[in-house]
Amino acid sequence: MLIRLHKVKDPEKKYRQRLFSGLDEDSSLYFTYCGERNVLEVRDLHYQVDTAAQIPWYEMLSEFKMPWEMSREPQPPTIQNLNLKVRSGQMLAVIGSSGCGKTSLLDIITCRDEGGKVKAGQILINGKPSTPQLVKKCIAHVRQDERLLPNLTVRETLSFVARLRLPTHFSDTQREQRVEDVIAELRLRQCANTRVGNEYIRGVSGGERRRVSIGVQLLWNPGILILDEPTSGLDSFTAHNLVITLSRLVRGNRLVLLSIHQPRSDIFQLFDLVVLLSSGTTVYCGSARHMVPYFTGLGHPCPRYCNPADFYVDLISIDRHDKEKEAECLERARGLAALFWDRVKGTEDFIWKPDESSSPALLASWFSEISFMRWGLEGMMQVQFKGLKYTVALGNFTIQIDGTSVVEAMDMNTDPLYACYLILVAICVVFMSFYYLSLRFIKQKSSQDW
């Protein structure tokens, strides 16, 4: 009789129990998300921020002009022609330099865009247009600025949020266990009883305060987790552990979308999908392990012992210290964005994938890249030809010829070097054959014959 009294008869409550609880009532942080699989889509998004409209009219009076006399200069769009699609079980990282539109994109997805206007495009969550009600139900957003109560300790903050956000069927013991799990996972045990603090009240450090903000959203076990630069203020070890935590959450049937500046190499390898943004345009969208082959095919190979995230973010960044450099960087970024759009235009998820039919050519190119002969040839070209001018005298006329043109005319940059590989393979086979014959047919004299 007692069991029937605790039985849930309301179907909505039963769905909430299934959504917020895991198998065997596991209250740990890594229980599997039992809700429906989520799909987040961004289709042909064009967004523009009007910075002039954010200035109050009374501040414009300092220019001794009336508000209707103020001429506003046209501003380039913050985000243009952005397309992506990510599903549950995937972690997508939006990478780019400051001001490329990472935070604006996350604010648009969570319906928190302020001071801007969506010119075109739409955001779809599970096939439905994004609305504040749908976002509140499905998405947890960890913003860049911390909005915490400074006078509460870390444990008190998480306990307070747990009482507000966790379902009513959770007991006090389950709420306390969930709080302790979050504290342990985010490495907050040493400061659990310390006040959070702010710029006026002394409390935990900036990195610890950032982890508390993430823990507040992790408490209610969301299906879609969006984080705006979660590793800011964290040391490399803690940042790596935090991304490992997010990857484990992804394996529990969750969708994680985060923005990050330039992650270190081992963090970069944990991402399933990567989006590179440059001035609001997509330069690359695809698998993290396919990013280096993609840019290598465009003539931008990543140097050895170099972090791909650092190298390619520097490649697409805009240097605004000099107008000539700014124009050159903008032209390069626009060219890379146009090449990427030509390759993914017409696909379903707008993700670049390598062509499987060209695997022999890719294998040969890979052998050519790792060849010591290729390194020697490239070194010779760097020293003798690239960046140098050669003087050619034809009678009374003198012509300056670029060293790169000389290399192309002599066909010295052909790739791969098939003939050299065949010769090396033949030499190795011959020596291995002689070695086998010597062991098979030549008998060694015993020590008694000497």
Image (spheres, rainbow, N blue to C red):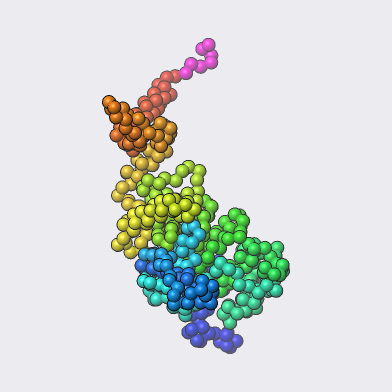
Viewer-proximal residue, 114 or 282?
114
Q: How many numbered discs, if any?
A: 0
Q: Residue furthest top?
A: 450
Quadrant placement of the N terminus:
bottom right
Question: What residue sits 31% from the left and 47% below the top?
Answer: 358
* Quadrant hosting residue 375: top left
Viewer-proximal residue, 448 or 341?
341
Evaluate whether residue 136 shows in this view. Answer: yes
Q: Residue furthest front?
A: 64
Instruction: Residue 214: give x, y in percent of width and height.
Output: 58, 67
Viewer-proximal residue, 344 or 20?
344
Report whether 264 appears left or right of 378.
right
- Residue 428's place in the image compared with 184, above or below, is above
Question: What residue sits 70% from the left and 63% below the top?
Answer: 190
* Quadrant hosting residue 150: bottom right
Evaluate whether residue 289 shows in this view. Answer: no
* Quadrant hosting residue 369: top left
Instruction: Residue 396: give x, y in percent of width and height.
Output: 29, 27
Report whether 237 appears left or right of 367.
right
Instruction: Residue 287: give x, y in percent of width and height.
Output: 42, 56
Q: Which residues are magenta?
A: 444-450
Question: What residue sits 48% from the left and 84% below the top?
Answer: 11
Q: Residue furthest left?
A: 395
- Residue 386's place in the image compared with 66, above or below, is above
Question: What residue sits 41% from the left and 53% below the top?
Answer: 327
- Residue 373's place in the image compared with 289, above or below, is above
Viewer-proximal residue, 56 or 381?
56
Residue 255 sits inside the magenta stretch: no
Report whether 70 appears left or right of 177.
left
